[in-house]
Amino acid sequence: MPNCKGTGIFFLRSLFKQSGQEKEQQFLAGLSGEESDLYHNASPVAMVPLEIATKLYALAAPLLFPGESRPLVQFGELAARNNIKSFHQFLLRFTDIPFITSQAAKIWSLHNDQGVAKAESFKDEKRVVFTIRNFPGLPAPYREMLCGYTAGLVKMSGAKMVAVRHSDSDPMAWQWIITWQ
């Protein structure tokens, strides 16, 4: 079973603290005992089952972002901002987007124990293709959350009109096409 860092679950707990107990109780009501234990005890640096983390994100996002058409994208974007602390966010404004996405690809394996990430930029185009290879079991809700995460990283550079389109045509090479102005 694939694993990911508990960073997202740790962040999820902080979002529920801000949102109030009622939303968190509603969320917890949909969890099994194992899922609830993981939610309450995951540390940011521990590896946790990706399947359970994905379920937690998918259940929590609509509660945390009611009315949003793509709540997992919202969660992913906020998670990116949370993971990149304020000083580093400031530095991102002086860095180009191909560099930011190439660094995100390099750290993929620190946060996930399956898949190989790569960012491909195109000279004179405001476009990057972020690809995760060799991970056919990457869950659809996690891929949706990654749309927001990659958008959040790019937006921190100061880019405008950021758009991320996910292509799921090849499960051996999931792709996120990132464009900006």
Image (cartoon, rainbow, N blue to C red):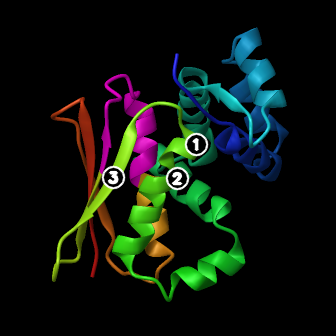
Disc 2 residue crowd, few under 14, some 14–19, many 20+, Cα 10 Å: few
Compared with residue 136, is residue 74 higher up or lower down, i.e. above or below? Answer: below
**Residue pointed to by mark 2:** 107
Percent position of residue 92, x then y: 53, 80
Q: Rounded to the nearest whole Å, what is the CA distance between mark 1 and mark 3?
A: 14 Å
Compared with residue 132, is residue 137 higher up or lower down, i.e. above or below? Answer: above
Q: Amino acid at mark 3?
A: Lys
x 42%, y 54%: residue: 105
In-image side of 57 versus 104 (left or right): right
Residue farthest to the bottom, as pictured: 94
Q: Is residue 87 visible?
A: yes
Compared with residue 123, is residue 24 higher up or lower down, i.e. above or below? Answer: above
Q: Determine the secondary structure under disc 1.
A: helix
x 38%, y 40%: residue: 116
Percent position of residue 113, x then y: 53, 32
> Is 43 one of the magenta-colored residues?
no
The reply to whether discs 1 and 2 touch (Cβ–Cβ < 8 Å) is: yes
Q: Which residues are magenta?
A: 131-147
